[in-house]
Amino acid sequence: MTSNPISSSSRGASARPLPNFQGLSPATSKEIERLLAGRTRDIRLSPELMQHFRERSWPQMSKLVRAWMIWVVVLDLLTLAVNAVLLPAEPVRLMLAPASILIPAALAAEFIFRRPHPIWMQGVAILLGVFLILLSVALVGVSAGGEFYERHLTIMLFVAVTAIIIFPIPFSWTVGIAASALGLYLAFQLNNPAIARGSALAGALFFATGVIATVAARHTANILAHKTFLLVLRDRKRLDELTDANTRLELLARTDPLTGIANRRCMIETLDRVWTGEGEQTRGNAVLMCDVDHFKQLNDSLGHAEGDRCLVKVAGIIQSSLRDDRDQVARYGGEEFLVLLRDADEQEACVVAEQIRSRVEAASLPNPKSTTNEYVTVSIGVSVTSQDDPSITADVLQRQADEALYRAKQGGRNRVTFFQRSSGAPSSG
């Protein structure tokens, strides 16, 4: 069994609720830094980044496109109703047929943008839908003739400009909307019997400057949106890196660097949580204080490298002797290890402690200068408390286990000694 000092003592604190920076290749991550380091106007998203941008911006784009389409339908119906009230019957009759083109075109585009579709389908839907809407508005004026001819062509350009301003769509689509609006305006104006060809061209040129300026503004807005997207990605990456670094630091702060098990700080925090009632309620707790016998002699005779190797081996043996993830071991001092057994009684604590002692002895780790055994051994002091004895705190339980350990050493080492609370003195097991 393994023991993770963070997972066993602070699972809630180490969880990472925030999404991490995944799905982008290292090359794309470098591309983000390169784009942000350059001029804003030079930002051009790579295919991978553009795909992520579209996925992120889809909800906003679809909502705006659908709202615009619905409002165009509403305004078209309101305009027809007002015209029916204010205008003679003949012009209204001539307006009905071309006006009817707008409604199905707008509703079809609105339907397409209710859920994501391939990018080409979105492009066809919005370009065809807007073109038919613009054509409908223009034909209403052309069909009615007279003063309505040029007025509705101007309204058509206004409708196109609102679409360009509102739609956060790819720049090529914006250019397509602008081109269709200007193309329709020029084509109908050249066939306008009320004005000369030169006036038609001059009017088209005048409106073209305004439309082109709007397209340029839309292009700038797109670039700024791309930059904001890149900044969000970079910030998420940095946040993930910072979270990972904090997690590693927290792990280091709770882990003994030599043995890899929990350190004293981590164990103290765990004991505090157990005794303040956090987590699962247990019927009792046991503390085992384990000490490597004659460890100084081992260091003096075999060297500190062998001493470190011994501690790593002993820590591994103790870990493997624990019952499940409720139990925890920590290196508490130089050669001391403290074991917490949750939901354990005296008998279970006895079994675990004896397993640790016997397995360390059976490992045959050399300790030639030991007066107890030629191999490494451990002495263990055990103290157990029950849930219905609230007077026994974690500190008291540790002191009792430490006292039992002292008695084990006095009694010849390489043994397990229990603290008997009834008699106030430890007894060997």
Image (cartoon, rainbow, N blue to C red):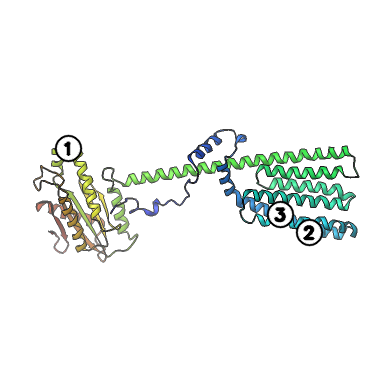
| Left or right, residue 378 beside residue 387 | left
Considering only order in the chain, which callout, 3 or 2, is on the residue closer to the N terminus? 3
| Disc 1 crowd, CA 10 A, few/some/many (<14, 14-19, 20+) | few
Quadrant in the picture for the C terminus: bottom left
Tag 2–tag 3 contact (CB < 8 Å): no
Which residue position holds label 3?
69
Q: Nearer the viewer, residue 82 or 97?
A: 97
Residue 88, visible in the rendered structure: no
Name which quarter of the figure residue 366 lies in.
top left
| Left or right, residue 10 beside residue 383 | right
Identify the residue at image location x=90%, y=50%: 146
Residue 376 is situated, as x and y percent measured from the top left of the image, at 15, 47
Residue 117 is situated, as x and y percent measured from the top left of the image, at 62, 53
Q: Nearer the viewer, residue 269 or 46?
A: 46
Which residue position holds label 2?
77
Which residue position holds label 1?
303
Quadrant in the picture for the N terminus: bottom left
Q: Which mark is residue 80?
A: none
Amino acid at pointer 3: Met
| Left or right, residue 404 beside residue 120 | left
Considering only order in the chain, which callout, 1 or 2, is on the residue closer to the N terminus? 2
Is residue 87 positioned above or below 188 on the image? below
Amino acid at pointer 2: Leu
Residue 140 is situated, as x and y percent measured from the top left of the image, at 83, 53
Residue 223 is situated, as x and y percent measured from the top left of the image, at 62, 40
Q: Nearer the viewer, residue 47 or 317?
A: 47
Residue 47, visible in the rendered structure: yes
Amino acid at pointer 1: Gly
